[in-house]
Image (cartoon, rainbow, N blue to C red):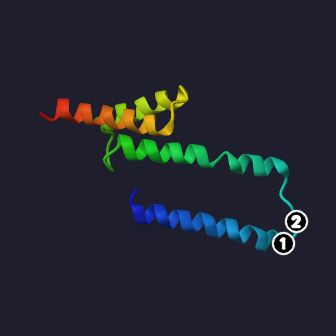
Amino acid sequence: MTWPAILALAAGVYAMKALGPLVLRRRELPERWHALTGLVAVPMLAALVVVRTATDGTRFVVDPRLPAVAVAVVAVSRRAPFAMTVVLAGATSALLHFVFTR
């Protein structure tokens, strides 16, 4: 997926979100709907990260990015600070690039 496509999709989502109040006017959506729509962003972001990390656009690729994301997931699950998570993932990727591209 390209950046223009991502930006176009983001604009479309915001447009749909803005049209909601215009179409519904003063009617309220059920509380369950609000809870479900709040949960959509996390899996969508995770899917985007996986697609951008594990593919080269047309096929599945295992390169140093994938283990770096795995290290970041472990660091986040252990509640490591954000800066430490970034440094650990970057160091993992750099080390694997160094080892396998010699």
**Which type of secondary structure does the marked residue at label 1 adopt?**
loop
Vertical arrangement, residue 57 with respect to residue 81, above or below: below
Q: Residue at x 63, y 70 (%)?
A: 15
With 84 as the anchor, is 58 left or right in this view? left
- How packed is label 2: few (under 14 Cα within 10 Å), some, or many (20 or more)? few
With 89 as the anchor, is 40 left or right in this view? right
Q: Tell me the quadrant of the picture where the C terminus can be found.
A: top left
Q: How many marks?
A: 2
- How packed is label 1: few (under 14 Cα within 10 Å), some, or many (20 or more)? few
| Residue that sits furthest to the left in the current view | 102
Vertical arrangement, residue 20 with respect to residue 79, above or below: below
Q: Which mark is residue 25?
A: 1
Whether residue 62 appears in this view of the structure is no
- Residue 51: % across, % down: 42, 45
**Rendered image quadrant of residue 55:** top left
- Residue 85: % across, % down: 44, 35
Q: Residue at x 32, y 43 (%)?
A: 59
Mark 2 and mark 1 in contact? Answer it, CB < 8 Å.
yes
Q: CA distance from mark 2 to mark 1?
A: 6 Å
Q: At label 2, which amino acid type do we have?
A: Arg
Q: Tell me the quadrant of the picture where the N terminus can be found.
A: bottom left
Q: At label 1, which amino acid type do we have?
A: Arg
Vertical arrangement, residue 61 with respect to residue 11, above or below: above
Q: Nearer the viewer, residue 40 or 93?
A: 93
**Which type of secondary structure does the marked residue at label 2 adopt?**
loop
Q: Nearer the viewer, residue 55 or 101?
A: 101
- Name the residue beneath numbered marker 2: 27
With 83 as the anchor, is 92 left or right in this view? left
Whether residue 25 appears in this view of the structure is yes
